[in-house]
Amino acid sequence: MTRMIRLGRLLVGLGGLLLWLASGLAAASSVDNLRLWAAPDHARLVFDLSSPARANVFSLDNPRRLVIDLDDSQLNANVDRLDLEGSAISTLRTGVRDGNGLRVVLELKREVEPRHFTLAPNDQYGHRLVVDLEYPGESAVEDPIDPIEAMIREQEIAADRARSEAVAQGRNPADVTAAEVLGSAKAHPKRDIIIAIDAGHGGEDPGAIGPAGTREKDVVLEMAKRLARLVNAAEGFRAVMIRDGDYYIGLRQRTRIAREQKADFFVSIHADAFNSPRPNGSSVYALSQRGATSETAQWLAASENEADLIGGVDGSLSLDDKDEVLRGVLLDLTMTATLNDSLTIGGQVLDQLGRVNRLHKSRVEQAGFMVLKSPDIPSLLVETGFISNPDEERRLRDGAYQQKVVQAIFGGIRGHFQRNPPPASLLAWQRDRNRSPGGNEYRIQPGDTLSEIAARHGVPVTQIKQANELNGDIIRVGQVLRIPRS
């Protein structure tokens, strides 16, 4: 009897041991795939995992490396197929660590600031480890505008202009005074109007996916590039691409880039989706200070804002708190004038789009999209069509149709700025020259008042107001006034 009891205990112990071993094996994770997204200012490396895995990421010097250790994990992917082009990674090596762990070593070509986080499964991916390599001092856009460099360049041009004038007068250019340089710098800058073009989604976030597998991020990037070419080909305009490749940029960073680049207007391009294939047509959205203006707009605002979560701002992908999120986005907005401009431009864009495609809504909708939150830049989000509709998905893939859509978008934007050009722009200079040939220009300096400027030039204030379409006495430093002949 005692022997039977001991045998039973032994079997129970063995069963427990086998169960413990089985649970340990079940807890082990495998890296099933690696994906890399290279951007101008960062790279994102994504590990697709079979189950959650604890990671430790640290840097080493001489040579510069980044080490990624995953506990209880094994490699089940071919890392040789990973394209490292355009990233800071020169080589990627892997090995076994402590018998049951995985070590990934990135040999780096430049300094990086790493950060990492995990993401839970969603409709498109399973468990993921995301490692971001941010490049200190780099801009997210190509050929960024450096305001200090622009100011120095303007001063150098003004100095060259003043010296040339001195030579023409028979004077020694070395005798040119600072006052003369400042006076020369007051000439009209004739600057380009900057249009910031944002292709929605990108990289880890594909956006909506059509019935035939078309990814929103690919369609809108192609349209953004087409729009940028149109903008750059137009005299007096210049495009800034928020992203020009397949990588992700946070929603708040998109508006921050536009502001850093001194954009006059921001347009975000998307391809709509719904949980039914029937809806179709194009839509134009401006920001609403009171929330979404329709149930569809409210649903869209939440789904587009979710892109920040997919991109890694945090690991939660729940839509349950969308109303709270939208309220939070809208709380700090004080942008009545900017919103009015957005709605005006949106109406013109919508009118042009209606000549190319059916309109889903006949007026500019308003919703709480994060990318529209800049308080000082008129902004629109254009849903070019429903990628969830099979017919529109097919058209959205067509290059000729894409070109018509972007021509409509730019037609609306260009028409607005031709009628309402920023004061320092080339278009404003051309308009003013046509209105009142001859006359002078004056750039407003700190401390100037309209009455002092009028007295200095011997011109009544009313004539200056009329020549510059001023409704009041408010003027801004840097604004260029047309001074009519007295």
Image: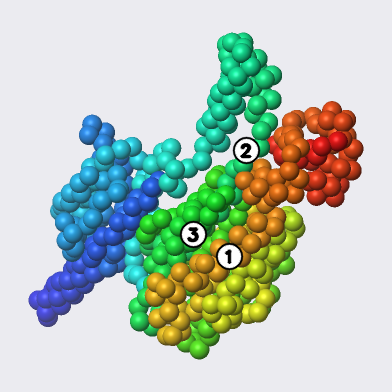
Q: Earlier in the sequence, mark 3 or mark 1?
A: 3
Assign a secondary structure to mark 1.
Answer: helix
Q: Earlier in the sequence, mark 1 or mark 2?
A: 2
The amino acid marked with disc number 2 is: Pro
Q: Residue at x 55, y 44 (%)?
A: 260
The amino acid marked with disc number 1 is: Gly
Compared across the picture, whether 464 is left or right of 360 comes to right
Q: Which residue is mark 3?
A: 230
Closest to the observer, 434 or 292? 434
Q: Residue at x 42, y 46 (%)?
A: 142
Q: Is residue 281 above or below residue 402?
A: below
Q: Residue at x 76, y 37 (%)?
A: 439
**If the image is split into quadrants, where does the N terminus sit?**
bottom left
**If the image is split into quadrants, where does the C terminus sit?**
top right
* Spatial CA span between label 3 and label 2: 23 Å
Closest to the observer, 165 or 355? 165
Assign a secondary structure to mark 2.
Answer: loop
Q: Which residue is mark 2?
A: 189
Q: Earlier in the sequence, mark 3 or mark 2?
A: 2
The amino acid marked with disc number 3 is: Leu
Q: Which residue is mark 1?
A: 411
* Spatial CA span between label 1 and label 2: 25 Å
Closest to the observer, 160 or 247? 160
